[in-house]
Structures are given as C-alpha cells and as structure tokens.
Image (cartoon, rainbow, N blue to C red):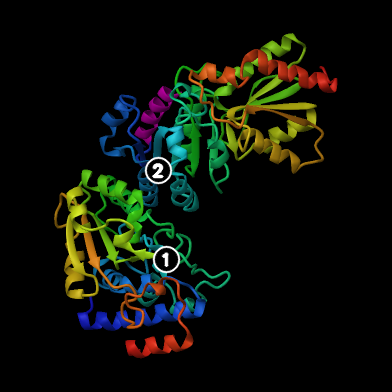
Amino acid sequence: MSTNRLLEEFTAQVRAKVVSLSHDARTPHLGSSLSCVDIIVALYDSILNVDPKNPEDPNRDRFILSKGHAVTTLYAVLAQKGFFKPELLKEFNQPGSPLPEHPSFWCVPGVEASTGSLGHGLSLGVGLALSARVQKQSFKTYVLLSDGECNEGSVWEAALLAPAHKLSNLCLIVDFNKWQATGRSQEVTALEPLEEKFASFGWGTQRIDGHDFSQILPALQACGQDSEKPLAIIADTIKGKGISFMEDDNNWHYRIPSEGELLEAYKELAV
Amino acid sequence: MRNAFAQELTQLALENSKTVLLSGDIGNRLFDDFKSQNPERFFNCGVAEANMVTMAAGMAMNGLVPVLYTIASFMIYRPFEQIRIDIAYHKLPVLIVGVGGGLSYASNGPTHHTLEDIAVMRSLPGMQVVCPGDAWEVRAALRDFLSNPQPTYLRLGKKGEALVHQEVPSDFSIGKALKVREGYAGALLAVGNMVPMALEMAEVLAQEGIDLAVYSFHTVKPLDDAVLRHCFSNYAWTFTLEEHSCIGGFSSAIAEWLVDRPFLPGKLKRLAFADRFIAETGGQSYARELSGFTLPSLSLIVQETFASTHVYA
C-alpha cells in the first residue's frame, strides 16, 4: 500500500497515459476514463488481493469494470502493476492487438469480464459473490459503474437481489461524474438521491469525494464490515478530472485530444 | 418433459457439486426435492431474467455450472443481450432451459408463444441448441450437457408429451440425431415436441405407400452432418417438422446446410409455422390446427410433395 502522496503520483502517471492512449489510438471516452482514475488506482494499489504473477488464483478478489468504455484507465493500471508489459499499451486498439477498445475476457491477464454494453457488471458481481459463498471462498467482488449506466434496468434488478442474499462480499462503486454521453445524468433520469436509493434497497452506503484518497480508501475498506449488507459507494467525481480544460466539459466524452492538448495535459500533470 | 427435467437434475446434482439451479420465479413445487437436497445451490432470482442470466455468467466464471430455468419466451427474448454477451461471448458453461417452447403455453397468448427462439439462439456463436423429443431425451440431454458443459439452450415442452423411447436412449449424444423409425421412401426430420407427431404421420403415410424414416433431430446446433448427408444422398425427399416459425428455425438451418452442398441430389420440403402471431384464443392443439399442423394436413402435404414429382416408393 502506498502513501497518499505516492498514490497521487501514480494517478498522474495513469492520467497522462490515458490521455496519450486516446490521442495515439484516436479513441473516445477520455472524460469517462479520467473520472475513475483515483478509484481504480486505489483498488489496485491498496485494496484488491490480486497477484499479477498468479492472475487466475481462484481466491483473488474480483474487479469488474462495468463501465467498460473507461478501459484505458484499467489497462494503464494493470500495466503499471505488472499484469502485462507496459510496452503493450503502444498497441492499444491497433489491428490484432490484445488490447481492444472495450475490455475483453480474452484480452490480457487481469481483465475479469467483457464489458462495453452497460448494465451487466453488477449482475456479474452478484453471481461472483454468490458463487464465492456456495464454494466457501473468502474473496470479495468490486464493481465499478458509471452514473449513466444506472439508467439500465438490469442494474436495479441486481440492486434488489443482492441485499436479499446479504452479499456482504460485494462492493459497488458508482463513478458519479454527473454526465452521460449526451447530457447531465440528473436531467436524463432522476438519479438523485442516489445514495438514499441504494440505502432504501437494503445496501450499506457511503457517499464520498471520488478523488480524495482519504475518503476513497476507508470507504473501500468498509466492504464486508457489515455482514448483513452489500456496500454501495457513491463517489462524487468530475468528468475529465485532472486536466483543467477537460474537467466537467462533456465534449470530452467523444473528443480526441490534439498533439498540443496532449502536451498541455502532460504539463498540467507534471509528468 | 418438465417433471423429467426436475427429477433428472435433482439426481445429477447429487453427483455434480458444481451444479446450481436458478429459477425465474417459476416451477412452484417442481424443485422441492432439489431445494431440500441442495438448499445452498438453488436460487429463485425473481421475475428479473436479465439479472438472472448475468448472475449465472458470474457464477460460471468462478467454476460453477449454472442451470437457468424459466418459461422459454421469457428466457430467450428479454435477456437475449445478456445471453449473447455474458454467456456466449464468454463461452461459459451455462445451461439455458426454456420450458414451454413452441406453443406449449398457447392459451396464454403470443406473449407466451416461442416460435422464434431457435432462430435467434442458433445465431449465437458457440451456442448449442437442443430440443429433446420426449422426456427420456430430456434426461439424456441433461446428462450429456453435464459431462461436457458449454453454452447450451435446452428447449423443453411442458408436460404430458407422448413418449418416443421406453428408456433413456443409450446412444443419445448432443449433435447426433436419433433415428426413431426405419423407412426407405424418404426422411422426416422432427424437432422437439413434434417428434411424436412425426411418428404418427409416418404410420399414416406408410398406409399410403410412403414409408418414411423418422429422426429425432434433437440438436439443431451443431447439426448432424452425417445424417444429413445420408438423407440428402439417399432420399428424393427429406422433410423437416418443427413447432417454430418458418423463418430461422430448424428448417432454415437445414435449408442453409443444403444450399451449401449443391452436389447433393435430395430435395427439402419444410413443415414449419407461418410468419405470424397466433393471436386467436385457444390451446396448443387449436393453435396447431389454425396453422395447418394437424395429422391429416401435414400428411397430405407429404403425399402431395411426392405426387408432384412422381417419386412414390
């Protein structure tokens, strides 16, 4: 586990890599990838019991990136943690590359599920958590959703079922960056009060600043502490976080950074 | 078929500790024995099929072999994307069981009819599609699946279907059609709950001088290549019979197979349901009657087909 200062350096490197991947491969969803950097870094650095040398360990913790369009963040973190060689990132989204534009079960070690169609991850997490119970395994399952993803009905089917089974080995994190592809998420569907919704469904809940490690880490560590409930963490985040001219500007859902914007981002991140 | 399914699964679960059963809030009392023997391996997932399918995928990712069970129309149509991505794309060992396939639930109306399920399921890469011809074949199919679990759709009827076999057919294997009647004039390939009807047709037609071999073509995917080569090489006419739309089902699969082999001399005649919703009120036999799926009507089509080409036996 790193100190918060080291974590912040780690996140700056990840953000720089995420911007460069978008620039080099000309792939969208940059704002969405940047909003969840701190959460994914916290998970892989300090929370998940995973071993890059034994990525198929049956007792490893599971992380499902349900918002699969943010895959560049996952790739950057997995590469840094040694699940695959960082040089492979240069092949991101190239023909024949093992690193596709949305994560695949079949791509590189460390990616647990094929996502990209929204609304699947939480149900996968429920299945994994139940299978751990059936087989008397102690691992935990963490699932990261976007706020726009909460439009999907299947999310709420899973949200209803998990507390009925008291899945205390399941942790849901909503990357609540307040935007979805074409509008403010709160204007598209009445998500708020989101924490209260999950609480009323029977989840343990926390609402945190999703960019503050002093809040992220204790929240994630709380998974399993209440043996009766799954845990939902509503993480308030900023789309495009870390690059001033991208922050809270939804054009960066699809925009590709120019060479100049890439260099400007590097300068801001001091990498 | 459904009682045989529940009994066989309960028995097999004793030997297969990885087997878990997920129900979409149906099968009241049907699974009591399974539940009492394996309370930790039965999950009533409620009326939430999308979540149920993906949950099963999650379980399979961690080594379990889930069996999903609900009414066929709800099992396939609503959570089709979940089946496609979470089970098929991940190549996970999940058995997707649809009870009441075809018109088994005819009186419940088109919401409960399942005449397009084979079409969509066989289009999924790597998905096996199995339609047992009777309760014995249901048991055999379950055993075969559990011996080599992979993404599979099992299309069941409901209850009380006529038996084709007297016991579990020892030569049953997913992907291998079963010959259930000898004949030399032509072949009748029947799927699922139409196999008993096919045998009755063959008896009627034999009295008219048309002696058909009948196959229970329980596996629509993968197709039994050897049996098809035999039929289209040796018979002037091969007929397909299914309780499914004429678009995309078993007969379409055979038609696709045949046009890719233009060197084969045999011809195909399809007996399938018209491209329409059967909105008229009535049970399975009435719905079949409306669609021309009666013993006399179907037998007549076969006779006329032979007559049209003067290829009587």
Is residue B6 highlighted in magenta? Answer: yes
Estimate the spatial distance between the alpha carbons at disc 2 and disc 1, rounded to whole Å: 29 Å
Badge 1: few (under 14), some or many (20 or more) residues near its Cα, within 10 Å?
many
For the residues bearing labels 2 and 1, Cβ distance under 8 angstroms: no
- From the image, tell me which residue sits under label 2: B65
- Nearest-to-viewer mark from 2 and 1: 1
Which secondary structure, mark 2? strand
Three-letter code for the amino acid on which mark 2 is drawn: Val
Three-letter code for the amino acid on which mark 1 is drawn: His
Q: Quadrant of the C terminus of chain B?
A: top right
Expressed as whole percent of the image width and height from the top left, the position of residue B162 reads: 52, 16
Name the residue located 19 percent from the left edge and 52 percent from the top edge.
Answer: A203
- From the image, tell me which residue sits under label 1: A69
Q: Is residue A198 left or right of residue B303?
A: left
Q: Which residues are magenta?
A: B1-15
Chain letter of disc 1?
A
Is label 2 on the same chain as label 1? no
> What is the count of numbered marks?
2
